[in-house]
Amino acid sequence: DAGVTQSPTHLIKTRGQHVTLRCSPISGHKSVSWYQQVLGQGPQFIFQYYEKEERGRGNFPDRFSARQFPNYSSELNVNALLLGDSALYLCASSFLDRDSYEQYFGPGTRLTVT
Amino acid sequence: GDSVTQMEGPVTLSEEAFLTINCTYTATGYPSLFWYVQYPGEGLQLLLKATKADDKGSNKGFEATYRKETTSFHLEKGSVQVSDSAVYFCALKGSQGNLIFGKGTKLSVKP
């Protein structure tokens, strides 16, 4: 069975640009969460979506936004990129939302902002 | 707010040595607790979990016991292998259903 997939694998952008990251959850999973992992740190929660609705949001600026599609895949958008946005962006899927405690992570998208 | 504190690394051990990675948490109530492992160049994998006090999670020779008295969830393994070299993250389930992670502990096992 396919796990969580993310695209692209790597991405290089310039300050001020916009980026879109994509995630496909495990088949049957309805919840997708996004995390940012800065080098040397633990992942930080950005968003959780369940059945196309936002169910949770971390402490990130409004430059970060996300959405979930009818097929449960998701996009994370970041506007006006800053150097500090350089990180590994992880997507995780689970069957339910806050009642499900097992999240499965994808390999991540490595974003470098220059 | 909820938080996780784990021992800083890196931790370097010889093969077959005993491993302990300390983890303590601050939270309202008794959240589910997890250990995740991240191998080089890969995403996070769930290693083990415990959902209530005194539960012991175990997997692949690793163990951790949910201690509410000391708000701890220390990771242990009796005999590490070179293949255990990775970064280990302690985490708790937050009120939004999200995971709250510690900063991670890098483990290097030498043959």
Image: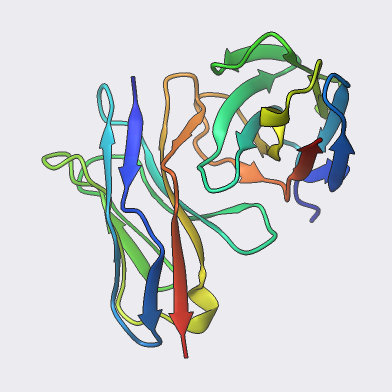
Please give the count of numbered marks on the rendered protein.
0
Residue found at x 78% / y 40%? A112
Q: Residue at x 20, y 48 (%)?
A: B54
Relative placement, left or right, of B22 versus A106 is left
Q: Nearer the viewer, residue B46 or B2?
A: B2
Whether residue B79 appears in this view of the structure is yes
- Does residue A85 lie above or below A39 as drawn? above
Residue A15 in the image, given as x and y percentages of width and height: 82, 25
Q: Is residue A27 visible?
A: no
- Name the residue located 73 percent from the left edge and 12 percent from the top edge: A63
Query: In the image, A92: left or right of B61?
Result: right
Percent from the top left, x then y, of residue B1?
33, 19
Q: What quarter of the picture does the N terminus of chain A occupy?
A: bottom right
Residue found at x 49% / y 36%: A101
Q: Residue furthest left?
A: B69
Vertical order, B93 against A9 (above or below): above
Q: Which residue is most to the top?
A: A62
In the image, taking residue B44 as reference, residue A17 lies left or right, namely right
**In the picture, which quadrant includes the C terminus of chain A?**
top right
Q: Quarter of the image holding residue A31?
A: top right
Vertical side of A32 occupied by A58: above or below = above
Q: Residue A104 lies in what quarter of the image?
A: top right
* Residue A72 placement: quadrant: top right
Q: Nearer the viewer, residue A90 or B52?
A: A90
Q: Position of residue B9 (x, y in %)?
A: 38, 59
Residue A36: percent from the left, percent from the top? 63, 34
Colour scheme shown: rainbow
